[in-house]
Image (cartoon, helix red, strand yellow):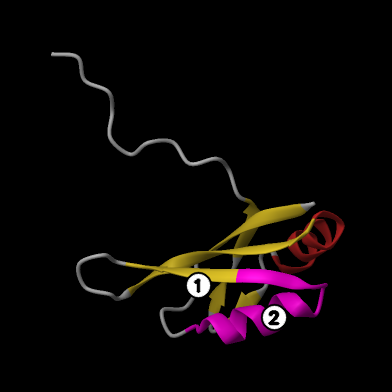
Amino acid sequence: MTKRIYVGNLSFNASEEEVRELFAKHGTVHSVALIADRDTGRPRGFGFVEMDEAEAKAAIEALNGMEFGGRSLRVNEAKERNSRRPNRSW
């Protein structure tokens, strides 16, 4: 079973390949997705990595708080996304 990992506080210059290499030290990386702004296409400084569950836990412990690209990474288990638009019943 795979686990989705949130990776925050990424350098805006970080590439998917660099992030893949960083996480691959802790196990098999199934996917990497760095998020970009819809309008400008510029990186937003966060992304997601998918790994097998046991390897994901090891990667989270090892990489959370680690300096990467001049910034201290924030790495934890991704949470389910809620709708960004509130339900309004007016």
- Residue at the top extreme? 90
Name the image quarter holding residue 52: bottom right
Q: Is 47 situated above or below 87?
A: below
Q: CA distance from mark 1 to mark 2?
A: 12 Å
- Labels 1 and 2: the sequence-earlier one: 1
Viewed as shown, does residue 75 lie left or right of 59? left
Residue type beneath disc 1: Leu
Q: Is 72 situated above or below 22?
A: above
Indicate yes or no whether the magenta region holds residue 56: no
Dot 1: few (<14), some (14–19), or many (≥20) neighbours within 10 Å?
A: many
Dot 2: few (<14), some (14–19), or many (≥20) neighbours within 10 Å?
A: some
Viewed as shown, does residue 25 lie left or right of 85? right
Residue under label 2: 22
Residue type beneath disc 2: Leu
State which region is magenta. 14-31
Residue at 82% of width from left, 73% of height from top? 26
- The secondary element bearing badge 2 is classed as helix
Name the image quarter holding residue 7: bottom right
Residue at 64% of width from left, 60% of height from top? 75
Viewed as shown, does residue 34 lie left or right of 63? left
- Residue 82 in the image: x percent, y percent? 44, 36
Residue at 81% of width from left, 54% of height from top? 53
Tally the numbered discs. 2
Residue at 69% of width from left, 69% of height from top? 30
Indicate yes or no whether the magenta region holds residue 15: yes
